[in-house]
Structures are given as structure tokens and as C-alpha cells.
């Protein structure tokens, strides 16, 4: 069984955390090193440099020992004035979370909502920006993990640049970074963040982010940005190898190695591998009488497929997976029990996916 081949644990095909390869797990079993040790200082600097090609940016990158949700909050505290308007493109649970964080930070969120399973329309966003008060930031969830929808980010960002040129474009790339096409500089983004536990195929614990020069300049003008996640300070200090707080040292070493592995595979190849995994998953679903929850093929996520169960017993399906040594998802939020998700992100291969599909 696949379970025996991978070790005594269920192989994760959930939408995060994802399966971690043995090489990376072994790195994290290393003897601990002090975070002020010159060797580790050099490692932190190296990781920062290796994050740039991951985001495809020549601007600013850094990481912090925190969840992606903390980086959501950092964006509000650093890039929006107190009481300032934030516009959120919502189509699922995580886009909604960002709007709640805006309100919790004393900002004024406005939601541009779409039904579950549908992507936002650039023309509708243009209409809103032309006819309403301009926001300080536009927040976009690139890949909505809860529904398996990927947004037309390049087109949406172009609309913001045209109709609200001073607005910062903030993007949650938690389940797209290193799994779906993302071009920070070319698409004119200002802030993008992810966690290590999704397409980077590492344990949770680190948040990685890119921030534009103009966003850092904006942050310098914002008061009460916080302490740990003060972006101007954090970017400068982390790139110098001097993290403000003690980071998760073993995970930083694993991230360093994983960034080398990602670059060796090549970003185009990595993006294509995820598309191949998506295509095979949906082909299997159709062959069994299921259908993709996202009806527009262009809006289907390359990293997590949400499949309409059509009344089938989702609990029984996940038990089949578990019996064969796999862990899969039963649906999220309003879709729980009505749809199931297969997270084919990170370092999964077609061969490993085929083992899961045979079990189902």
C-alpha cells in the first residue's frame, strides 16, 4: 500500500498542510543552531535572495515565523491608514477572512462578492472603481482554497492600475505560490504572501512575502504599524540576516533546500506539473459521474480541485482513502459534505496521484 511506501502516516492530499518529502523532513531533524550564529545569519540572507525568483520579483522579499493570517493582518496595519477604505474581492472563506481582519484592525472594509465557485470579472471591478469611492488597497485572494477557484489576477491587477492607480494591490497567494503562474513585478502587484505548508510542501510555520518599493514607501507613512510585522523594519533586518524574533531554525534550513529544488525543477515546469495533476483529477472525477464544482474551466485551480459530490456519500469516500493510506478533504464551510477537495499541490507526482485515484 502507498501508506507503507511513504512511512507510517497518511499521505496528505488535503489542501494543506501538504505531503513533505523525506529529504526535507531529514533536514528538519538536524541539531539545532543558534539564530545569531554566523552560519544561520548567512542562511537567512540566502533564503531571502532565493525567494525573489519564486515570486518573480526584483523588489523586496522576506519571511517571518508566523501563519499566513498574520501576514494578512500585517498588510492592513502597514498599508492602510486607520479608518481607511479597503476593497475585498470575496468568493469564499479566505477572502471573507481578510475583510474581517480589516475591520478588526480599525479599517473600513467593502466587499465585492461573487457566488461560491465563480471568479471575479475584471469589467465588474472596473465599474466599481469608476463609480465608487477609491480604496487605499484592493485585496485579492488569488486562489480561493475553500472553493478551488483561481482568479484572473493579471487582468484584475491591470484594472486596478488603470482606474485606481494609487491603490495598493494586495494578494493572498497562499495556495498559488509555487503552484500556479504568478509574476509579481510583471503584473504590478504590491504585496503578496503565502505559508510554507501549501505548494512549498513544507510544514506550517513560516510566512513568505514580497512587497513592492512603493508599498514600503507607503508603509513608512503609516503610524502604529505594529512591532514584529513592521514591514519596513522587517524587510531590512531579515534581508540582513537579523530576524527580530527567534525563527523556526530547522524550517528555515528546509525552506532553503526546497527553494533550490523548486528552481531546479523550473517555475514553468512546476506550474505545468500542477496543471497536469488538475487535469488528471478532473478526468477521473468525470469518469465516475462527478463534476468540478467550478463550472468555468479557466477558473479552476491548478492546486486544489473542488468536486461536486452530486449527493454521493463524501464521508464514505474519505474512509476509502483512509483505508488505503491517504487523507483527503470532506469539503469546507458551506460546501462541507456537498463537495470534496483533492489538494494536488506541492511535490505530488502523477504516479502518487494515480495511487489515490485507484484507491477511490
Image (cartoon, helix red, strand yellow):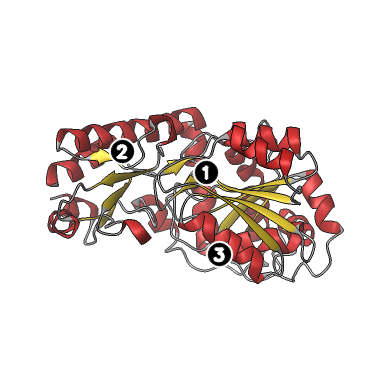
The answer to whether marks 3 and 1 mark residues whose Cβ atoms lie closer than 8 Å is no
Rendering coords of residue 197 (x, y %): 45, 56
The answer to whether marks 1 and 2 mark residues whose Cβ atoms lie closer than 8 Å is no
- Kindly state the secondary structure of the residue where label 3 is placed: helix
Rendering coords of residue 109 (x, y %): 66, 60
Rendering coords of residue 54 (x, y %): 58, 40
Which residue is identified by label 1? 177
Whole-angstrom CA distance, mark 3 to mark 1, is: 22 Å
Whole-angstrom CA distance, mark 3 to mark 2, is: 28 Å
- Observer-nearest of 170 and 17: 170
Which residue is identified by label 2? 349
Q: Who's the residue at 44% across and 57% down the image?
A: 27
Task: Please tell me in which quadrant of the rendered image residue 167 appears.
Answer: top right
- Vertical placement of residue 163 versus 139, above or below: above
- Kindly state the secondary structure of the residue where label 2 is placed: loop
Q: Who's the residue at 44% across and 35% down the image?
A: 299
- Vertical placement of residue 293 versus 39, above or below: above
Q: Is residue 253 visible?
A: no
Q: Is residue 257 visible?
A: yes
Whole-angstrom CA distance, mark 1 to mark 2, is: 17 Å
- Observer-nearest of 24 and 289: 289
Which residue is identified by label 3? 249
Q: Who's the residue at 66% across and 37% down the image?
A: 127
Amino acid at each position: 500500500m502507498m501508506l507503507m511506501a511513504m512511512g507510517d502516516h497518511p499521505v496528505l492530499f488535503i489542501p494543506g498542510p501538504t505531503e513533505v518529502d523525506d529529504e526535507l523532513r531529514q533536514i528538519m531533524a538536524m541539531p539545532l543552531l543558534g539564530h545569531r550564529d554566523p552560519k544561520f545569519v548567512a542562511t537567512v540572507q540566502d533564503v531571502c535572495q532565493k525567494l525573489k525568483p519564486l515570486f518573480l520579483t526584483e523588489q523586496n522579499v522576506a519571511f517571518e515565523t508566523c501563519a499566513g493570517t498574520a501576514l494578512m493582518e500585517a498588510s492592513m496595519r502597514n498599508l492602510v491608514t486607520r479608518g481607511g477604505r479597503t476593497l475585498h474581492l470575496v468568493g469564499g472563506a479566505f477572502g471573507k477572512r481578510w475583510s474581517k481582519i480589516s475591520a478588526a484592525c480599525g479599517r473600513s472594509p467593502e466587499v465585492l462578492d461573487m457566488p461560491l465557485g465563480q471568479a471575479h470579472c475584471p469589467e465588474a471591478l472596473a465599474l466599481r472603481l469608476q463609480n465608487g469611492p477609491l480604496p487605499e488597497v484592493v485585496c485579492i485572494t488569488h486562489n480561493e482554497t475553500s472553493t478551488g477557484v483561481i482568479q484572473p489576477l493579471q487582468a484584475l491587477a491591470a484594472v486596478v492600475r488603470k482606474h485606481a492607480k494609487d491603490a495598493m494591490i494586495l494578494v493572498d497567494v497562499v495556495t498559488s505560490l509555487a503552484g500556479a503562474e504568478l509574476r509579481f513585478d510583471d503584473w504590478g502587484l504590491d504585496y503578496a504572501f503565502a505559508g510554507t505548508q501549501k505548494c512549498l510542501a513544507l510544514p506550517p510555520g513560516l510566512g513568505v512575502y514580497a512587497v513592492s518599493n512603493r508599498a514600503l514607501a507607503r508603509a513608512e507613512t503609516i503610524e502604529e504599524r505594529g512591532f514584529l510585522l513592521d514591514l519596513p523594519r522587517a524587510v531590512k533586518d531579515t534581508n540582513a540576516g537579523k530576524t527580530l524574533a527567534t525563527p523556526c531554525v530547522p524550517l528555515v534550513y528546509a525552506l532553503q533546500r526546497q527553494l533550490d529544488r523548486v528552481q531546479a525543477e523550473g517555475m514553468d515546469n512546476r506550474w505545468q506539473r500542477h496543471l497536469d495533476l488538475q487535469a488528471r483529477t478532473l478526468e477521473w472525477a468525470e469518469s465516475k459521474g462527478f463534476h468540478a464544482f467550478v463550472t468555468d474551466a479557466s477558473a479552476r485551480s491548478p492546486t486544489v480541485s473542488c468536486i461536486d459530490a452530486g449527493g454521493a456519500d463524501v464521508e464514505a469516500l474519505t474512509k476509502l482513502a483512509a483505508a488505503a493510506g491517504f487523507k483527503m478533504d470532506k469539503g469546507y464551510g458551506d460546501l462541507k459534505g456537498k463537495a470534496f477537495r483533492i489538494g494536488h499541490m506541492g511535490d505530488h507526482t502523477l504516479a502518487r496521484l494515480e495511487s489515490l485515484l485507484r484507491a477511490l
